[in-house]
């Protein structure tokens, strides 16, 4: 009998335990603020940097409108999803530890396999996207210093490959952190970093507008004829939808974050508060960064606000912002990949319960700290995972296209479809009732947006591959 089973028996006999929760696991300690930090770490990621470009494709009317609509949909469906953490009673029902567990408990069958495939493919893709984004920021620091020394018209060509390798090495080290509960500190550091570079990007946009005294851009976005063809305008507008969807994507790890929360109060209540706080904060940031970036550069808004060199000075401030991006992405990579790591390791343990390579933990003494628990399977498999994502990033380093594909691929199924369908089952909403019809209309509309965004992003990849040379920037 495991320690968790013994604790569960104690709970059943003696009631509430000071050391263990109702499922026999060690008492959870998360709060609305740690959950908010996890969400902000996941949400205010590299996606914020492409929002000026996305706004430029859509214009002053559609750009802010789409940003607000995505924020509302994300908050609403996340609230629905938080009600699915426990099956049945929201206070005493059986806990679902992962997104897939929630789908299994509420929908079951083939949908579980579909959900798992989409979720873990999306997490894998996010790891690639963050590797690309971090290397771009590291390259930007190098180029910024080069421009400062040699002038704005210097070539300053730098390969991103060494920087992707550096990021990969850092992630191999941090990937040995066993689970979500032990990365709260990393999330808080990453959340601070995300505010740092977002604020710098916003400040530079505001200063550019103040300096020129002119607001760039138009009501309908990038001009047809002078900048792009009519077909390119359509594809880019669709790609912008994917970029904005990616900027709000965190639903796929919501259940895992909720599983770190202490109770009482009920986890769903705390999670809804954390979701409201974090989505409100990020939406304000997104509106400001996207709109001021567009106001500063108009049709010329760069794909990545802090690395596209719309700004050259003050170079030291750009360096601070890009270093903050890298630090943030180191943490965000872990927040997103922990559920995938946990799934593979749980599956391996179930398949080979007697394998010492998979189950045995080696205690490595660290002076002044508790011994570190090193698991050989975790060491090998997580290292291989990071190496694979790093190599793929080297082969296809297209920031805006990858961001658009990830946003399109994950938004409808993980942020909208599964939360809506699980909520309908959980709350026993009658088919063809007014509420059921409204939820299905929401789901259908988001599906159309996702398909359009995917088409635009794949068109962008095809276009970039025509001129791309591997391992060059």
Image (cartoon, rainbow, N blue to C red):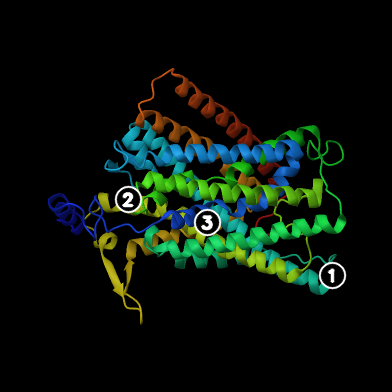
Label at residue 151 = 1
Instruction: Count the marks.
Output: 3
Q: Look at 53% across and 54% down and name the residue there.
A: 40
The N terminus, quarter of image:
bottom left
Which residue ends up furthest to the left in the rendered image? 13
Viewer-nearest residue: 82 or 18: 18
Q: Is residue 457 visible?
A: no
Instruction: Compute the Cα span from label 3 to label 1.
Output: 35 Å
Viewer-nearest residue: 303 or 106: 106
- Dividing the picture into quarters, in which one does residue 165 lie? bottom right
Viewer-nearest residue: 342 or 155: 342
The C terminus, quarter of image:
bottom right
Q: Nearer the viewer, mark 2 or mark 3?
A: 2
What is the secondary structure assignment of the residue under circle 2? loop
Q: Which residue is mark 2?
A: 264
Instruction: Compute the Cα span from label 1 to label 2.
Output: 59 Å
| Nearest to N terminus: mark 1 or mark 2 | 1
**Left or right: 296, with 345 as reference point:** right
Label at residue 41 = 3
| Nearest to N terminus: mark 2 or mark 3 | 3
What is the secondary structure assignment of the residue under circle 1? loop
Q: Look at 70% across and 40% down and name the residue there.
A: 63
Q: Is residue 211 above or below residue 103?
A: below
Label 3 crowd bin: few (<14), some (14–19), many (20+), radius 10 Å: many
Q: Look at 43% across and 18% down and name the residue there.
A: 433
Q: Is residue 397 above or below residue 240?
A: below
Q: Residue 364: x and y, percent?
A: 32, 75
Q: Is residue 240 visible?
A: yes
Q: Residue 180: x and y, percent?
A: 39, 58
Which residue ends up furthest to the top in the rendered image? 432
Q: Residue 357: x and y, percent?
A: 28, 62
């Amino acid at each position: 009998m495991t320690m968790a089973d013994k604790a569960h028996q104690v709970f059943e006999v003696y009631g509430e335990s000071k050391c263990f929760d109702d499922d026999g696991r060690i008492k959870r300690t998360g709060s609305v603020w740690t959950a908010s930090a996890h969400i902000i770490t996941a949400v205010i990621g590299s996606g914020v940097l492409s929002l000026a470009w996305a706004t430029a494709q859509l214009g002053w009317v559609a750009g802010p409108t789409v940003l607000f609509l995505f924020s509302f949909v994300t908050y609403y469906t996340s609230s629905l999803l938080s009600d699915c953490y426990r099956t049945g009673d929201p206070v005493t029902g059986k806990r679902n530890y992962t997104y897939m567990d929630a789908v299994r408990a509420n929908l079951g069958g083939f949908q579980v396999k579909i959900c798992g495939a989409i979720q873990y493919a999306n997490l894998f893709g996010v790891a690639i996207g963050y590797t690309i984004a971090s290397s771009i920021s590291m390259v930007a620091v190098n180029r910024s210093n080069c421009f400062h020394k040699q002038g704005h018209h210097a070539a300053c060509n730098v390969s991103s490959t060494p920087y992707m390798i550096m990021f990969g090495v850092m992630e191999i080290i941090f990937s040995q952190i066993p689970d979500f509960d032990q990365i709260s500190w990393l999330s808080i550091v990453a959340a601070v970093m995300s505010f740092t570079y977002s604020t710098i990007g916003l400040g530079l946009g505001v200063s550019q507008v103040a300096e020129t005294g002119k607001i760039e851009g138009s009501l309908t976005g990038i001009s047809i004829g002078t900048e792009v063809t009519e077909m390119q305008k359509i594809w880019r507008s669709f790609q912008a939808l994917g970029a904005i969807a990616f900027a709000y994507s965190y639903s796929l790890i919501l259940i895992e974050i909720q599983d770190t929360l202490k109770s009482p109060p009920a986890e769903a209540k705390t999670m809804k508060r954390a979701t409201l706080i974090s989505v409100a904060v990020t939406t304000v940031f997104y509106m400001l960064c996207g709109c001021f970036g567009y106001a500063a550069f108009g049709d010329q808004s760069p794909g990545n606000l802090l690395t596209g060199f719309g700004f050259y000075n003050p170079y030291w401030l750009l360096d601070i912002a890009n270093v903050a991006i890298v630090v943030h992405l180191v943490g965000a990579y872990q927040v997103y990949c922990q559920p995938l790591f946990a799934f593979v390791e749980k599956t391996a343990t179930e398949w080979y319960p007697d394998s010492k390579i998979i189950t045995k933990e080696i205690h490595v003494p660290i002076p002044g700290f508790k011994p570190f628990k090193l698991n050989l399977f975790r060491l090998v498999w997580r290292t291989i995972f990071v190496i694979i994502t790093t190599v793929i990033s080297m082969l296809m380093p297209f920031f805006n296209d990858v961001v658009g594909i990830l946003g399109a691929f994950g938004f409808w199924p993980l942020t909208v479809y599964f939360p809506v369908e699980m909520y309908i089952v959980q709350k026993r909403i009658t088919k063809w009732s007014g509420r059921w019809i409204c939820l299905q209309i929401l789901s259908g509309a988001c599906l159309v947006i996702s398909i359009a965004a995917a088409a635009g992003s794949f068109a962008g990849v095809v276009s970039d591959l025509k001129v791309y040379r591997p391992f060059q920037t």
